[in-house]
Image: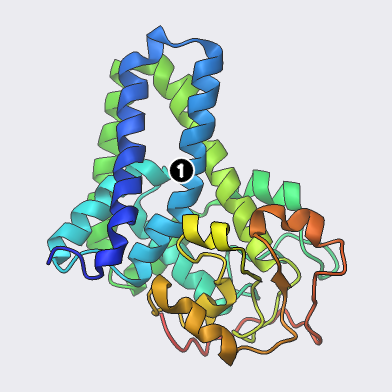
């Protein structure tokens, strides 16, 4: 069997759709009007956010294929969808799991906040993509044994970028770059909402879960985010089984992370006691 888990076929399908949309837009860029290009940019950026949260995310914890070569090829191709070499995202994400939104987590909501408070939502979302420290990510990737993957994926990614810049300059500068930035902003916004008011080193309380059926169906149980932090290696299809092991006083939203900006100001938001912002090196699973 090609897939490690047969239920992962939608992950591959979504990644291929995203790549196909990029190619189609590049070929037809000069024929499309402003409104059509704007709509396509929003669609691709939304798929990019989905990629960070679902496609690449699941591939990090549970590689899609039985073949290591197939997993490498997928990661390299998916770098084009992410707008960054996949191995850098792997390093970034594993750092996030190690420190759980506390000190040491490069994506922590507290890192650029003031007086121990979380950074403002819009500031965090808009600036996070611009703060990427590639030297830091390279060091992390080397520790994870991903040095060769970084080199290969970066070479492939840069080669495609140079080719795009040379052959489709307007498409690359005025569509691809802004769209990739928008997608990373959406992914940063989602990350904020997945960890809002949860800067605890306790991996049972350091994120926010949502249990809306449609949300978890379309995003492969991404709403079970605290469950994922508690058991990172568990396949997405098994996450609902972990809910019963978690404390009742943790942060949850009744619907989805998408609407939690409104819900966060209501009584449906539960804040666990005794927040701490210290990171933890006691990472149980990777």
Residue 278 higher or lower than 87, as above or below: below
Q: In this figure, which colouring scheme has been used for the structure?
A: rainbow
Decide: is 117 above or below 242: above
Q: Nearer the viewer, residue 119 or 6?
A: 6
Regarding residue 33, the answer to whether it shows in the image is: yes
Give the percent coordinates (x, y) of residue 7. 30, 65
Foreground of the two, 27 or 201:
27
At x 26% / y 50%, what residue is drawn? Answer: 76
Q: What's the residue at 32%, 24% (across, down)?
A: 24
- For disc 1, the marked residue is 47
Q: Is residue 22 above or below residue 145?
A: above
Residue drawn 38% across and 57% down?
56
Taking the view exactly as shown, the residue that stands out farthest to the front is: 213
**Residue 225: x percent and y percent?**
56, 71
Residue 197 located left or right of residue 37 = right
Task: Specify whether residue 180 is in view.
Answer: no
């Amino acid at each position: 069997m090609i897939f490690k888990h047969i239920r992962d076929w939608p992950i591959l399908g979504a990644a291929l759709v995203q790549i196909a949309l990029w190619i189609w837009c590049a070929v037809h860029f000069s024929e499309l009007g402003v409104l059509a290009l704007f709509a396509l940019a929003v669609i691709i950026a939304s798929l990019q956010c989905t990629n960070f949260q679902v496609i690449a995310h699941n591939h990090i914890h549970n590689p899609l294929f039985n073949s290591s070569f197939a997993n490498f090829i997928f990661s390299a191709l998916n770098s084009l969808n992410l707008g960054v070499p996949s191995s850098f995202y792997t390093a970034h994400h594993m750092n996030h799991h190690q420190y759980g939104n506390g000190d040491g987590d490069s994506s922590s909501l507290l890192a650029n906040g003031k007086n121990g408070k979380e950074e403002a939502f819009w500031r965090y979302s808009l600036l996070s993509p611009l703060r990427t420290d590639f030297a830091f990510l390279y060091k992390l990737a080397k520790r994870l044994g991903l040095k060769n993957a970084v080199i290969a994926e970066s070479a492939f990614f840069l080669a495609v970028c140079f080719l795009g810049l040379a052959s489709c300059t307007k498409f690359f500068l005025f569509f691809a770059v802004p769209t990739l930035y928008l997608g990373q902003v959406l992914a940063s916004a989602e990350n904020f909402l997945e960890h809002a008011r949860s800067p605890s080193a306790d991996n049972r309380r350091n994120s926010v879960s949502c249990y809306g059926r449609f949300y978890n169906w379309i995003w492969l149980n991404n709403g079970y985010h605290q469950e994922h932090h508690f058991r990172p290696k568990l396949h997405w299809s098994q996450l609902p089984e972990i809910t019963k092991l978690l404390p009742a006083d943790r942060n949850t939203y009744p619907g989805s992370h998408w609407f939690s900006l409104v819900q966060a100001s209501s009584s449906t938001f539960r804040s666990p006691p005794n927040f701490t912002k210290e990171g933890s090196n006691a990472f149980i699973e990777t």
